């Protein structure tokens, strides 16, 4: 009888140790390109595990907040160095657990490297404000101060980058964290935290509790000792988290769904725009929060452009992301694939015209994975559900328009506001789009994806709640301003009263 190697069993990381979950249940981390491959087993944690992790983080906060920021940053710097040396291994691990092609998982690890270096630099740049006091012999300044335990809840589509966007700024600002990674992709978060531990992070400063949203995420968000909550995921769950934070006024950062658009004007470089739409729509199988799921094309070039788009989409090679020949990997799981299939049906019933794709791929080499054809709908009305709702799969809806003003109206006519893009050679329209597109990120002559870590990242409307990830903006979320007044006059000076004399 053939022997089967037992799957690797992973643990939670609490108070500097890898420990089993208390409930004894496990979650399978399977390869979406081949569900027979079990990448690992991770604990399905409960409230009891969350409590241990938050207790550890709360205790660690007492000393971590007092470690000088440049010293905290040195650990981040070492973390980034180790990540650089293991980039290829971690990219392969990530492709195995979530399916996107190697070039993209390398990019995901690179983003974690960039963010960690960036925040290492911030250890020596936590500038405050000094300002004259309105009273004599009095000194005034404002400094950033750490807040406490941060509860971090992350999605599966950027399984190392997104945890790093939250962990690195939280730590450099002196907070401690408990991370609840997505249940589909715990391995990449494990790899990131493993490196932080190796780089010398004191016990309890970072903790991971694996598990489902309701069993592990919810108790973490509700816990009375988590003062900060940062969540990236669907708008539906974001709303639940927002409500959970409201009664105790927790500082809560939400990054949620999108319905991003690329606008192609008839004066654009159409070859460039086509490359951009293919990358924006089908990168990560359309499962990026910034994915271009709408393309609005000016009527003069609409027929030509959409015909070429269908042709190019049809030619994309779908397969295992580890294969260098593959252009597009699988969707993450059966549920996500069913969502894509459901929206294809909705689009057809709404009267949109399917020009390529539209089917699940399940024969031959595809039979053990969750694959779907790259799919293009044309002649889509902007009010159709496929043009309004987030699909999160390899489906793009082409919408014709006459004027630039109409294009802006279509672009802004959705509840989301994450990313948008305009292809044009008209500088006036480019600047108007930069001003008038209602999204947190706008690109000119580049697709809707491709954010860099040193700029703020986030959305408006139903995509975000006013905070930003990345860049210096991240420091604002992970710290509180404290205003400090030092009176050296040796007498009572009353602001707004004595200075009027
Ligand atoms: P999801 O909302 O289903 O899950 C996200 C995380 O929340 C997971 O870790 C999950 O376990 C947890 N969760 C679920 N229910 C919870 C609850 N009741 N309490 C606490 N935690 C809970 O999202 P997903 O399917 O993992 O990711 C896809 C979504 O994420 C898409 O909508 C996408 O647009 C969005 N996303 C947004 C951004 C952004 O920056 N705006 C980035 C990436 C992904």
Image (cartoon, grey):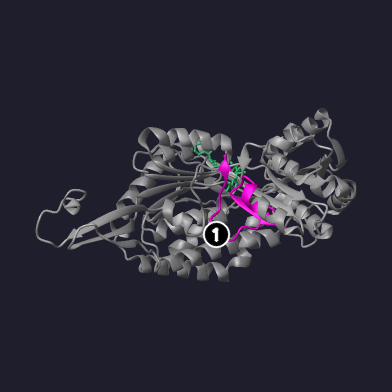
The structure residue drawn at horizontal position 54% and vertical position 51%, both measured from the top left corner, is 9
Q: Can you give x and y, in whole percent of width and height, for residue 486 in the image?
A: 19, 60
Is 126 in front, or is 326?
A: 126
Q: Is residue 5 visible?
A: no
Q: Which residues are magenta?
A: 434-461
Q: Can you give x and y, in whole percent of width and height, for residue 151 in the image?
A: 43, 46
Is 212 in front, or is 284?
A: 284
Rendering quarter of residue 453:
bottom right
Please say whether residue 457 is one of the residues in the magenta stretch.
yes
Image side of residue 470 versus residue 126, left or right? right
Q: Which residue is mark 1?
A: 455
Q: Can you give x and y, in whole percent of width and height, for residue 120 in the image?
A: 45, 67
Q: Is residue 114 visible?
A: yes
The structure residue drawn at horizontal position 61% and vertical position 59%, both measured from the top left corner, is 108
Q: Is residue 388 above or below residue 88?
A: above
Image side of residue 123 versus residue 497, left or right? right
Please say whether residue 152 is one of the residues in the magenta stretch.
no
């Amino acid at each position: 009888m053939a022997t089967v190697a037992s799957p690797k069993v992973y643990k939670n990381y609490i108070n500097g140790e890898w420990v089993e979950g208390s409930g004894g249940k496990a979650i399978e981390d399977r390869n979406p390109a081949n569900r027979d491959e079990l990448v690992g087993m991770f604990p399905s944690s409960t409230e009891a595990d969350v409590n241990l992790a938050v207790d550890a983080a709360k205790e660690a906060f007492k000393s971590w907040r007092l470690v000088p920021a440049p010293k905290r940053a040195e650990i981040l710097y070492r973390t980034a160095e180790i990540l650089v040396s293991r980039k290829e291994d971690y990219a392969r691990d990530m492709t195995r657990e979530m399916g996107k092609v190697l070039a993209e998982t390398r990019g995901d690890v690179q983003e974690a490297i960039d963010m960690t270096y960036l925040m290492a630099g911030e250890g020596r740049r936590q500038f405050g404000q000094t300002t004259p006091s309105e009273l004599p012999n009095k000194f005034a300044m404002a400094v950033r101060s750490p807040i406490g335990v941060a509860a971090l809840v992350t999605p599966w589509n950027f399984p190392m980058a997104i945890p790093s966007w939250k962990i690195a700024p939280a730590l450099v600002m002196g907070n401690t964290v408990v991370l609840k990674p997505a249940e589909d992709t715990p391995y990449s978060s494990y790899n990131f935290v493993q490196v932080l531990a190796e780089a010398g992070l004191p016990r309890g400063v970072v903790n991971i509790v694996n598990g489902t949203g309701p069993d592990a995420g919810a108790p973490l968000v509700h816990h009375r000792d988590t003062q900060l909550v940062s969540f990236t995921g669907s708008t539906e769950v974001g709303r639940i988290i927002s409500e959970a934070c409201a009664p105790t006024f927790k500082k809560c950062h939400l990054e949620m769904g999108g319905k991003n658009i690329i606008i192609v004007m008839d004066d654009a470089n159409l070859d460039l725009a086509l490359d951009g739409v293919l990358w924006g729509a089908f990168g990560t199988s359309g499962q990026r929060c910034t994915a271009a799921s709408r393309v609005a094309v000016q009527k003069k070039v609409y027929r030509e452009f959409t015909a070429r788009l269908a042709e190019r989409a049809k030619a994309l090679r779908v397969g295992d992301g580890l294969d260098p020949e593959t252009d597009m990997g699988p969707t993450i799981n059966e549920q996500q694939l069913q969502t894509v299939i459901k929206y294809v049906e909705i689009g057809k019933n709404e009267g949109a015209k399917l020009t390529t794709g539209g089917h699940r791929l399940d024969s031959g080499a595809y039979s053990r994975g969750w694959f779907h054809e790259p799919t293009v709908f044309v002649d889509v009305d902007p009010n159709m559900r496929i043009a309004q709702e987030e699909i999160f799969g390899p489906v793009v809806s082409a919408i014709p328009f006459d004027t630039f003003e109409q294009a802006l109206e279509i672009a802004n006519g959705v509840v989301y506001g994450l990313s948008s893009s305009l292809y044009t050679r008209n500088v006036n329209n480019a600047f108007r789009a930069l001003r008038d597109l209602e999204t947190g990120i706008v690109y000119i002559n580049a697709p809707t994806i491709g954010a860099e870590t040193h700029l703020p990242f986030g959305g408006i409307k139903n995509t975000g709640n006013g905070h930003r990830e990345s860049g210096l903006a991240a420091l604002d979320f992970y710290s509180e301003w404290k205003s400090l007044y030092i009176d050296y006059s040796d007498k009572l000076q009353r602001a707004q009263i004595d200075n009027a004399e």
